[in-house]
Image (spheres, coloured by chain):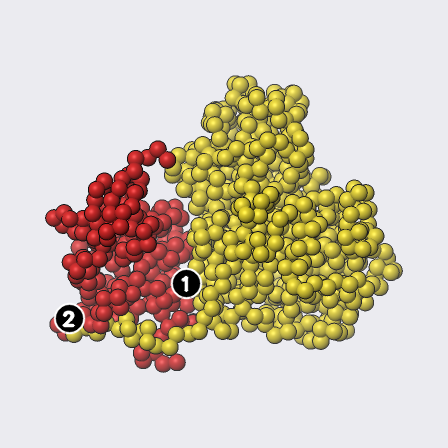
Chain colours: A red, B yellow
Amino acid sequence: MSAEQVNLTIDGRDISVPAGTSVWDAARALGIDIPALCHDPRLRPVGACRLCVVDTGQRNLTAACVRPCEDGMQVVTDSADVERHRRMLTLMLLSEQPAESAREATTGDDMLYALARRYGIEAVDLPDGAEGCPRGADQSSPVIAVDHQACILCDRCIRGCDEIQHNNVMTRTGKGYTARIAFDLDAAMAESTCVSCGECVAVCPTGALTNKAVHGLWLRRGEGDGA
Amino acid sequence: MKRFTGSAVTAATPVPVNEVATVCPYCGVGCAVSYVADGDGRVLYGRGRDGSANAGRLCVKGRYGVDYAAHPQRLTRPLIRRETSYPKGPLSAFSKADSSGPRKPGSIVDYDEVLPHFREASWDEALDLVARRLLDIRQQHGADSLAGFGSAKGSNEEAYLFQKLVRAVFGTNNVDHCTRLCHASSVYALIEGLGSGAVTNVVRDVENAEVAVLSGCNPTANHPVAASFIKDAAEKGTKLLVVNVRRPPIADFAEQYVQIRPGTDVAFYNGVLHVLIEEGLYDSGFVAARTEGFEDLRAVVSRYTPALAGSECGVPAEEIVRFARTLGSAATAMFFWGMGISQHVFGTNNARCLIALALLTGNVGRPGTGLHPLRGQNNVQGASDAGLIPMYYPGYQSVTDDSVRARFEQLWGVPLSASAGLTTVEITHGALDGRIRGLYCQGENPFMSDPDINKVREALSNLEFLVVQDIFLTETAEFADVILPASSALEKTGTYTNTDRRVQIGRPVRGLPGEARQDWEILCEVANRMGYAMDYADVSAVFDEFVQATPLYKNLSHAVLGDRGRWYPCPDPASEGEKVLFSDTFPIGRARLVAAESAAAPELTDDDWPFILNTGRQLEHWHTGVMTRRSSALDAIAPEARVELHPQDAAALQVADGDWVRVRSRRGSVSLKANLTDAVARGTLFIPMHFREAAANLLTNPSLDPLAKIPEFKICAVQVEPLRL
């Protein structure tokens, strides 16, 4: 490789990587797991969720997935300050989540819930009546359930649709609190040009896009669900 | 305060599941997938694995379409036709003539109607009956009165054993499968031109191609995950040149899309070849060093000026010149094609043209170059490799070659027939005229997949003995004397060879239902009862014998294949196998440029039959629909057949989108709803082949390509009329 190499330390360990490598990828090469919700190695990084923040000794914490490595950089991925930020971000994202995760029930891999468990979050301290589920759902597809309430607007589904499968069906619509993902020009999923490949479900980190149970089978059931 | 119940959810009792690394049972792309199933073998979900062909991607069929295996209609006990249900004929109202219409039943075979004609039997009784009847027919009418249809959906091991059963036990080479109906012509032309019938490069190497020609194929529907890699390449600069009579969605990504008239492929490509030679846009070094037949090719294509070719295919001359210049100035080009090339009476000539294009431009044997007929079924490559072909033993070794035959006689320990067998449609015709009296059908459904179903109905009724080994009661099984309940892809261990020549192991996700048995064991049982000992410790031992018989698969075994598989040829078992073939030489030394002349299709439009009917597949369904129509998700997404009709033609017929129409050919008629789209050209129609209630093959023309014996599925003359309800 003729690409220029840069040398840095991550959590005190030296590493040399080609210039342009992200801090997230470099850490991964060292076996250091930096949590991320909006990033996946198969997708173009966008730095939306900020869960992957690390300390590079600068004024602000920086998102590792979009931050290129620099020569001489000293990265700390797990300081108390960093962890405090991540815990707060997790808490804020959870405050909008539905009470139960459709992803935990279907494929068992809700990344936001996994973070909640990692940070020992059992409850979100909001006044009564502050929460609700006003953001809607789309149950039109026979195979994919859309729950906007569980969506954290990480755009993984949009990138999965565009960049992995090149179906170019998904987009964002709305502003501010009403911002949400959409299909075509905000059609119902089943009426859109969606081809049901399920890539959006595969890359979604939360219960926003999940498989409908083909046999009516669930992987896990919550309390009070009965048998 | 809001309670967060994440921990409560995980504390609830999880359903016990197991996750199995296997291969998707649908198309030839061969996506590596894991299925997660509960203790009863019901699949909860699937997730893509990082396979060589799919890198974690899946499509709707592989991700959501595998619940068919757990469908309550699975066959669970051997069935024997009741005495009172002779003479044989179709049993469901649906399989009878003139059964297509808006008020007629649709969907899958009605078991309530068909099952009473059969009684359940023990395996011993059923197998003994099969062996005795086949032996009787052989004794009375000779071995060549027996025939077998194997399946491209089964594993390599099953295909190997099936052709061995027909050849070594029945004593005939009358064994074929649905490759005859999809790429027989491509394989014929490739073996003639290069000496090998498989692809010369893998789909994903399209990322290294400057140009990709996509001819007569609709990969977003038929090879969706392969299409995603082709679209990847297009977004990174690969120029797609798309030629198709019906606009495929991937044309949205194309540098150039050319909509030629049906059946004018040879004229179009001869026009392109003409320009390439005329303008010196070919690789003279490659042509001189590695090919033969250039002067003959030049002589033929010299007559196909762009103006002449263009007027035949309904394309401006400049389009042909532009196509040729884009292709001729690229350093690397790959050629993908599908049934739009192969399923014609001149399918071999169509494929010859594409091979000539690749050879003339030196685009074989390097990264980013190659010839790639996109194979349809999950194991159509492997089933062909394993010898489910009437003229070849495993590994394309000719049955008429004395030294080859001597080797197989030694391997199998019996004398073998020296004459090539009959092909799929010839076997059906043979059943009609009495040459074929006994047929063994393993996982094939010719009643739906062969052209001219009304003839197939007569043929199947005319058989003295038909045994069907399948997972469901198919339309074909309605004509059976004995039905043997078999294994689905989700219930067996076996290898499958994808369109890239990647050999991968499929593993069981669920147990067999009821008394159903593994296909390979059933085949051994039949052989044993016919007096030929077939005994294998397990399915990997069958693979080992297949490899021993097949130099192409040298060095491969189940242990070597592991979870990721290998490409064949695999000269070094520690390597991935060979991705790009023929870098230095071809199996026949020099490749052959074979010129083709344009010819008219056997059935053209006239005043009485003013439309051309095209047939094919759609994304959500699979071949004769036996599996996908029993998938709750796929059936919900695409529940009914529709005929594509150009909006202007529809206006002339006073037909609105969704209206019922009747489509009639000289051979039959079907009724279905109209889907108005300008993807089809004016004067042409498209009907998917999957729907029995509007079976496209009631209409199709059974004329055959004289060399490859593939039927003309893509062109027949029809009339359309609105059906006023």
Q: Quadrant of residue B340?
A: top right
Residue A226 image position (x, y, % from top left)? 36, 81
The circle drawn on residue A125 is: 2
Q: Which residue is mark 1?
A: A142
Give the amino acid at mark 2. Asp
Q: Are marks 2 and 1 on the same chain?
A: yes
Q: Earlier in the sequence, mark 2 or mark 1?
A: 2
Residue B1 image position (x, y, % from top left)? 16, 74
Q: Camera-side residue: B685 or B692?
A: B692
Q: Going 41% across and 68% down the picture, which residue do you hit?
A: A213
Q: Mark 1 — on which chain does it sit?
A: A
Q: Quadrant of residue B544?
A: bottom right
| Vertical position of residue A41 compared to residue B593: above or below | below
Horizontal relation, residue B682 to residue B470: left or right: left
Q: Camera-side residue: B148 or B588?
A: B588
Give the amino acid at mark 1. Pro
| Mark 2 vs mark 1: in front | 2
Q: Camera-side residue: B91 or B225?
A: B225
Q: Is residue B225 visible?
A: yes
